[in-house]
Image (cartoon, rainbow, N blue to C red):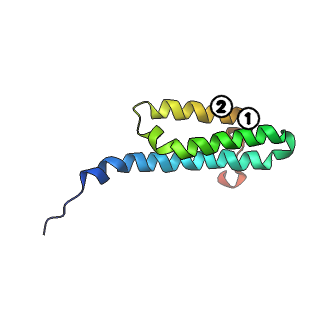
Amino acid sequence: MARVVSPVRVSNAPVTLQTDFYREEFLKHRACLARQREYYSERAITDADRGIERILSQLEQLCAKADADQVIGKLLRKYDVVTGLSAWSDPQKFH
């Protein structure tokens, strides 16, 4: 028996993987902000968290755009300036 693959599912697969990846990245920044709470004002934390929440709510639409990597990459770099997440490393990952 032949198996039929829905073209909608196939075309959404890369976007879903991309969306999941970027969602995890923004959630890492959110967790990093929470750990650094004492260094920022409550308003700064609230504003940054609200921005992450907004991005997360629109992530699927952003990932569907042709320039998604550039747009989302720019947003992640802006959050990285605040969180410094890219400078953190897990010592267990080194041998």
**Residue 80 in the image, given as x and y percentages of width and height:** 68, 36
Disc ID at residue 39 = none
Crowd class of label 2 (few under 14; some 14 to 19; many from 20; radius 10 Å): few
Q: Is residue 57 left or right of residue 15?
A: right
Crowd class of label 1 (few under 14; some 14 to 19; many from 20; radius 10 Å): some
**Residue 24 in the image, given as x and y percentages of width and height:** 58, 50
Q: Nearer the viewer, residue 57 or 12?
A: 57
Measuring 84% from the left and 39% from the top, which residue is drawn there?
41
Cα–Cα span, label 1 and label 2: 7 Å
Q: Could you tell me if residue 47 is visible in this image?
A: yes
Q: Secondary structure at mark 2?
A: helix
**Residue 23 in the image, given as x and y percentages of width and height:** 55, 48
**Residue 46 in the image, given as x and y percentages of width and height:** 75, 42
Q: Would you say the residues marked 1 and 2 are in contact, meaning their CB atoms lie under 8 Å apart?
A: yes
Where does the N terminus fall, quadrant-wise?
A: bottom left
Q: Secondary structure at mark 1?
A: helix
Measuring 62% from the left and 45% from the top, which residue is drawn there?
53
Three-letter amino acid code at disc 1?
Val
Disc 2 designates what residue?
78
Measuring 57% from the left and 41% from the top, which residue is drawn there?
55
Disc ID at residue 82 = 1
